[in-house]
Image (cartoon, rainbow, N blue to C red):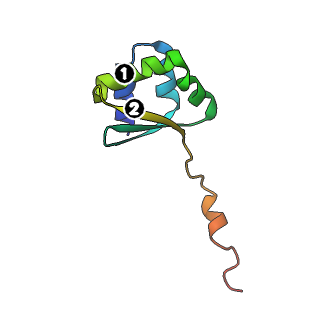
Amino acid sequence: MEHRIKALADAITNAQTKYLVLGHVKELHFENNHLTILVDNAGPLHELEEKEIDHHLQQGMEEVYGGDITYELKLFKGHHPHDRENEVPHEINQ
């Protein structure tokens, strides 16, 4: 996965956009010419949505994936190590 993020960042010419992609994009999901970009928190997500940054991001994606690519930015909701504790009861032998 990281090599795909790096390939996208390398195709971006704007330093700020490249920094945001390398530092805050956690996953890329590509399906049927649609790319979902998962970002680690809301601050960088909103920066990537700004008009100028979005323009540079789109140019980089078109270079890597072609001109007919569509995309969306979403907040990454990863699993925390203690999430499973909430699913499994602690007192099994009751």
Q: Tell whether label 1 touches label 2 (CB within 8 Å).
A: no
Residue type, label 2: Ile
Expressed as whole percent of the image width and height from the top left, the position of residue 27 reads 45, 40
User: In the displayed structure, would residue 65 be above or below residue 92?
Assistant: above
Expressed as whole percent of the image width and height from the top left, the position of residue 46 reads 59, 27
61 horizontally vs 25: left or right: left
Q: Which mark is residue 12?
A: none
- In terms of depth relative to the viewer, which is nearer, 33 or 88? 33
Specify whether residue 65 is in view.
Answer: yes
- In terms of depth relative to the viewer, which is nearer, 80 or 76? 76
Secondary structure at numbered mark 2: helix
* Residue on which the image places disc 1: 60
Specify whether residue 10 is in view.
Answer: no
Expressed as whole percent of the image width and height from the top left, the position of residue 17 reads 48, 19
* Residue on which the image places disc 2: 5
Expressed as whole percent of the image width and height from the top left, the position of residue 81 reads 60, 55
Q: Kindly identify the residue that appears in the image at 63 percent across and 67 percent down.
A: 87
User: In the displayed structure, would residue 53 be above or below residue 38?
Assistant: above
* Nearer to us: label 2 or label 1: 1
- In terms of depth relative to the viewer, which is nearer, 68 or 26? 68
Residue type, label 1: Gly
User: In the displayed structure, would residue 42 be above or below residue 62?
Assistant: below
Mark with earlier residue (2, 1)? 2
State which quadrant residue 90 falls in: bottom right
Outermost residue to the left: 66
Q: Kindly identify the residue that appears in the image at 37 percent across and 21 percent down.
A: 60
Q: Quadrant of the N terminus?
A: top left
Secondary structure at numbered mark 1: helix
Outermost residue to the bottom: 94
Q: Residues within 10 Å of mark 1 (few under 14, many from 20)?
A: many
